[in-house]
Amino acid sequence: MVEYDRTPLANTGSMDSLRICVVGVGGAGSNVLDRITMDRTVDATLVSFQTDVRVLNRSSAPRKVQLGTELMRGVGSGGDPDLGREAAMFSKDEIRASLEGHDMVFISAGLGGGTGSGAAPVIAEIAKSTGAIVVVFATVPFSFEGRRRQQQSADALERLQKCTDALILFDNNRMGELVLPKDGIQKVFAQGDQLIAQSVRAVTGIVSATGLVKLGLDDLVSALRVSEGRCLFGFGESKGKDRGSEALKRALKSPLINEGDLLANAKNLLVHIVGGDSLTLAEVEQIMKQLGRYVPDETQILFGIGVDPKMGDSLAVTLISALSAQDLSTARRFTEEQDTVRPKRAAIVKTVVAPPITQDAEDLFQSTTNGHLSTRAMEAARVSVAPPPAALLKPEAPVARPAPQHISTPAYAPVAGEVVYAVEEEFEEEVEMAPELVADAAPPPRDAARSRLMSFINTEKAATQPEKVKSPPPPPVDEIEIEAPLPAVVDSRAEPVPAAIIRATPQVRPVAVTDRVLVSRTAPSVEEPEPTATVDLFGGRGAVEAPPVKKPVPVPVEQQTLSLGGDKSGRFKDTEPSYATQGGDDLDVPTWMRLRRRANR
Amino acid sequence: MAKSTIYAGLEIGTHKICVVVGEAKRDGAIKILGVGQAPSRGVRKGEIVDFDKVQTCLNEALVRAEDRSDVMIRNVFLGVSGAHIESLNNRGLYRLPEDQGEITEDDVEEAKEIARNVPVPQQNVFLHSITRQYIVDGQEAVRQPIGREARSLEADYHIIHGVRGRIQNAIRCVREIPLEVEDVVFNPIAAAQVVLNREAKHQGSLMLDFGAGTVDYVLYEDGMVTASGCIPLGGDHITQDIAQAFQMPTPRAERLKIDEGSAFYQDVPVDALLRVEDDNGLHVGDVERAFLNEVIYLRTEEIFSQVKLRVEEHLGKLAAGVFLTGGVSLMKGVDAVARDVFGLKVTKAGSAPVSGVTATFENPQYSAPIGLIRYAQILDSEKPFLSPLARLGRRMADLLH
């Protein structure tokens, strides 16, 4: 839940020299990595991290690191994430050595097992500490793998969220949709790996390719900026005649997009078109025009074009978007109508509590209770949106209702250093993370769960201000039930250099929260941070319940229709040459004369 | 609505300008009321290069047509041609909404809209967009999709487009007469309506309108227009070849081509000589017949090869073979050359029988203008019935667009 830091990027010079590292952790990660290695499509360092020496031997990655050599002795972690984590800790230095010097690190891991769930967060953390941008592609186990593995993957996800810039989830349960039911299981997995490999490639392409119309990680993050949802990813590549529409057709064919139906509810859509030197404006325009049929006008389209000579004749279209779970369930009801988007949002509002935390938010708070809700206020307010326990929701109902879903909070509000300590005092906490790691982590890990905590605190605060709102007295603090352990990480973003990082571990339980702290918390919250987008690629089943973090959805800008040429601009290659010349001959010259000339030559 | 209507077709050809007045009867029969023709000047390769000359010739042809048919011509269907006219096939896929199982008219419109949304060169406009077929859930060649149970509907279009300015210039030239242009039609599309019968279209056929300035072709496959186009080579090139080969003036070469020209050159005895006379009947020289025929053969063969280059991929499906029409198809041996080039059965054909001036419809020169009448009739019959009020409304809507 941290705005991705642009400063290190600026220092690295041009994007052409972006150094990318793709990491596979555990068995599943290794498979994906193998796929990427074989495709040779991503220009990156490929590293495989394994505990099991057999997996490592089979892996075709050019660089292999065995985790916890002394500890594990080449045996796998046996599905125990603690063991996986231990192993990663052991090989900390080797991991750092292989990750160092990269601008972006893609981590591919299968969650639920030992190495993937245990080591991946550690690796992500180390990667983060080297100053790289970390993007995680994770698969969530099949539901038939049992509750325990689900729980392990949920835990791992929570850890991963803290230290990644973007998290893209693939749900194994939906993997079957990629292929026909009668296809062999091998094909299912191969397709799944391929999909992940494609998305790695697409994301690398988006972030690194020299773009005519460039997209960056910020665009990617904002496209994925819906939590507890599902990522819509579509990739299509085609060559030859009609390649533009063909590629788009393939991209839409992705089951994750459901033949384009799901796009009707997308609020942000990232479109990236990459082609070789032969990419024409008309093709781009045609693709965007066709795509326009699938997305409503309010959708913010993040659009990019890249030219990659390596593509040759082919053209690739990548669509990335995310839908929240609510949208997803309603998506199928209404597909084409755009009007349906609004009522849906209204429905969401009811389920959401948005306690104000900033001065702005308090203004909003008042104005909304009065029944006036201006867009300006909405914009100004940066309010955490979190689903509170139902019991809490009820007494707060009048407060909660006016907060619309657009309003969201900095997952990660900048808080002054003293406040941090104050918070620390109020919490009973035990730091579980290795202290040296914490010290290393220069850019603070993103804490998703914290926003939820904040919202609790603030909800309470709102309740304790009877002079402002006539709301029922606050429920006793003890009544606040937090089922999930709440990690709290606070960093001070107010200073350019993070001064202190205090991390509350998952075992933290807020015992008493005093008014003093709460008041101090309402201190400056100015910056609007980029949340880590947590997205469940395949529908949220079995995925960890990600803390809902929502950035203010931009006020629906009128969608720019990409009209680069006139109304009918052209692709000439489809049309025959108007004048079929024979070896450059002028056909108006008598045939016999040309033949004679040719004979004389 | 079922009353006979009088249409006028105008073709501005490289060799001649021709106005045909025809009456479309209630039963669908066509009666040719009159034909006005004038030699054409100021037209090159099927396109107008000199407005004034063309207008003079056009006036002449118009007056003759009005005289013969006793009809005052106000509106014409204009046949156009030219190398800039190109064609392509495009499909538009429309996926029906989840909750809908049956194809409605709106869905068809949507699919058509998608199919028509094909990028053509910027300066080009659509001349025709002809529905070839509908593909319903992958089932091809569906003619009538409305009411069918389906998940997806694809409209398959044959789109003919040309350079806006070049088409508009032809229209402007005619408007200045003044004549109102009701519709602009690509010549071979019109000609095919009378040259090819339903059977030929279904079996698959290639129609070549071998004119003086251009060869226009249209290819039918399975009853659907699959390819069409124009090659800027024609009879005038043959004449020019002869003129240059024998060092004689073009009119004399033209005369020689029409009177004696043939594309058979192999069995001609080498010493066979042709006497060439000037306008007064005086002997000006002799021409070797074998050489003359070879010159003609080479050019004709080349023109057909040019057509073949463009339709090669479809040649396997033409059971009905090649239909030759247009002025040059009157030349001896041209069908044999076509047979050699395409390897298909070749038929020289004029317009299908229509009543009226009998001498006219048999002449392949008039295929295109008569086809224009037929095209107009088809167009009208396909138009949904509109009350005068609705028609007014539509016109207003058109104006507002």
Image: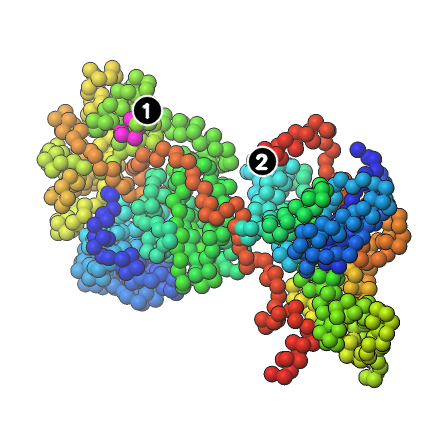
Which residue is found at the position 63% from the left and 48% from the top?
A: B168
* SS type, badge 2: loop
Percent across and percent down for residue A202 are 38, 54
Q: Is B393 left or right of A458, judged from the image as shown? A: right
Q: Which mark is residue B401?
A: 2
Identify the image quadrant of the C terminus of chain A: bottom right
Percent across and percent down for residue B209 are 75, 59
Identify the image quadrant of the N terminus of chain A: top left
Which residue is found at the position 28% from the left and 43% from the top?
A: A532
Q: Is residue A379 one of those drawn in magenta?
A: yes
Residue flagged by tag 2: what amino acid is it? Answer: His
Which residue is found at the position 85% from the left and 76% from the top?
A: B283
Q: Is B141 left or right of A182, judged from the image as shown? A: right
Residue A434 or residue A561, whichever sits in front: A561
Q: Which mark is residue A374?
A: 1
Question: How far, Cα to Cα, is label 1 from label 2?
Answer: 38 Å
Is residue A171 something one can see in this rendering? Answer: no
Which stretch appears magenta?
Answer: A377-381
